[in-house]
Amino acid sequence: MNDWVEIGKLSDIPRRGARCVKTPLGKIAVFRTATDEVFAIDDQCPHKGGPLSQGIVHGAQVTCPLHNWVFSLETGEAQGADEGAVRTFALRLDGEKIFMDANILLAVAAE
């Protein structure tokens, strides 16, 4: 069973916006959709390293601010003709509180 750690509140993130969490695995972008769903993915686009947290959120996707690559917030997969993916991370929403798997926050990067 996962241990969950509170990382913030839903109201900390604007609708169709993001906030970042620093972890040993790097920066993770936590997104809030227009319908108050939350998703977490790597903050770095695999194409040119753009900060996905600064991208435009539309539905359950985000568009990279550098070169308009689109990524699914649900799967991390690039959409359309683009190829590649970013890691996704499990979140749990309990009322207003957002929780992340404690193992992610304590992980040691395997590099």
Image (cartoon, grey):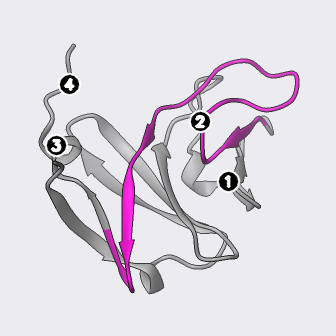
Q: CA distance from mark 4 to mark 3?
A: 12 Å
Q: CA distance from mark 2 to mark 3?
A: 19 Å
In the displayed structure image, the side of residue 107 where residue 11 appears, left or right: right
From this view, report whether residue 35 is shown above or below residue 27.
below
Residue 108 quadrant: top left
Q: CA distance from mark 2 to mark 4?
A: 19 Å
From this view, report whether residue 4 is shown above or below residue 66.
below
- Pointer 4 residue: 109
* Mark closer to the chain start, 4 or 3: 3
Which numbered disc covers residue 55? 1
* Mark closer to the chain start, 1 or 4: 1
* Mark closer to the chain start, 2 or 3: 2
Residue 97 in percent (x, y) is at: 33, 79
Region in magenta: 69-98
Residue 53 in percent (x, y) is at: 55, 54
Which numbered disc covers residue 76? 2
* Mark closer to the chain start, 1 or 3: 1
Report the mark closest to the observer, 1 or 4. Answer: 4
Report the mark closest to the observer, 1 or 2. Answer: 2
- Pointer 3 residue: 103
Residue 3 in percent (x, y) is at: 14, 55
In the displayed structure image, the side of residue 53 where residue 72 appears, left or right: right
Residue at image location 36% in from the left, 64% down from the top: 92
